[in-house]
Image: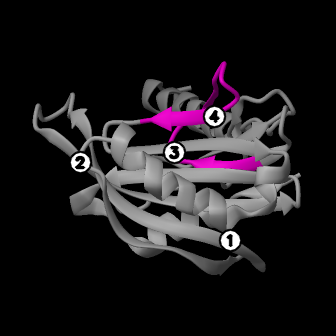
């Protein structure tokens, strides 16, 4: 076989092998770890790749802007240079009133969040056919490791009930100059109780 043809055949095998590996992917497992599912990786206008996270403890799934990790405090999060997502779950009698939870957070966040400013809400919206509470705020998350400038974010917090005793609190943040209201809702739309 001529050298040039041999190289083309070998290159073809390498490319086919790479596509086969990429097509296989991995499927989500009930381990509380991030898992990539075929079709779950998308690039949205320069934003991070969406990766499906399945939580084994609270039994939910969500697509995050990068690989989410389960934390010792029961939350799951991904903190990137320009985007972040944190999911916590509230259980018990307080979970029965998501509107009160949202109002309580709006009252306490100014003392624990730098430069907190409420932009809208809290108020009720419909998300995946369920009534949820939502509010939008701006805040400072320190200094950007990339630019060295202040990291001013727009945060959107959703209260997604499972039942009268369990509600997920989904907080998405993105740098102010990249904030898209529909993009934030799109992240929350991927949340599903299992």
Span highlighted in magenta in the image: 61-79
Q: Which residue is mark 4?
A: 76
- Image height of 147 relative to 39, above or below: above
Which is in the foreground here, disc 4 or disc 1? 1
Number of numbered discs: 4
In primary-sequence order, the first of circles 4 and 1 is: 4
Tell me the number on the disc at residue 102: none
Q: Which residue is mark 2?
A: 115
Residue 57 x, y percent position in the rendering: 84, 32
Q: Which residue is mark 3?
A: 85
Instruction: Give me the C-alpha separation between circle 1 and circle 3.
Output: 17 Å
In primary-sequence order, the first of circles 1 and 2 is: 2
Is residue 78 shown in magenta?
yes
CB contact under 8 Å: marks 4 and 1? no
Instruction: Give me the C-alpha separation between circle 3 and circle 2.
Output: 19 Å
Which is in the foreground here, disc 3 or disc 2? 2
Instruction: Give me the C-alpha separation between circle 1 and circle 2.
Output: 26 Å
Q: Is residue 171 left or right of residue 194?
A: left
Q: Which residue is mark 1?
A: 132
Q: Nearer the viewer, residue 70 or 9?
A: 70
Which is in the foreground here, disc 2 or disc 4? 2
Which is in the foreground here, disc 1 or disc 3? 1
Decide if residue 38 is in sight here.
no
In primary-sequence order, the first of circles 3 and 2 is: 3
Q: Residue visible at 55% across and 55% down?
A: 104
Circle 3 Cα neighbour tier, 10 Å, few/some/many (<14 / 14–19 / ≥20): many
Q: Is residue 154 left or right of residue 146?
A: right
Q: Nearer the viewer, residue 74 or 177?
A: 74
């Amino acid at each position: 076989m001529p050298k040039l043809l041999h190289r083309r055949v070998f290159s073809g095998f390498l490319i086919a092998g790479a596509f086969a590996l990429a097509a296989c992917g991995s499927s989500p497992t009930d381990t509380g770890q991030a898992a990539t599912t075929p079709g779950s990786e998308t690039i949205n206008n320069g934003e991070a790749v969406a990766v499906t996270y399945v939580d084994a403890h609270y039994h939910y799934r969500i697509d995050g802007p990068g690989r989410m990790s389960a934390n010792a405090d029961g939350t799951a999060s991904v903190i990137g240079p320009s985007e972040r997502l944190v999911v916590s779950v509230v259980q018990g009698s307080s979970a029965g009133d998501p509107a009160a939870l949202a109002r309580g957070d709006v009252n306490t966040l100014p003392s624990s969040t730098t430069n907190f400013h409420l932009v809208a809400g809290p108020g009720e919206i419909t998300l995946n056919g369920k009534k949820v509470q939502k509010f939008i705020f701006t805040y400072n998350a320190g200094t950007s490791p990339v630019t060295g400038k202040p990291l001013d974010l727009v945060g959107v917090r959703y209260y997604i009930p499972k039942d009268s005793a369990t509600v997920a609190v989904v907080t998405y943040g993105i740098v102010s100059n990249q904030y898209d209201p529909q993009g934030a809702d799109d992240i929350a739309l991927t949340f599903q109780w299992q």
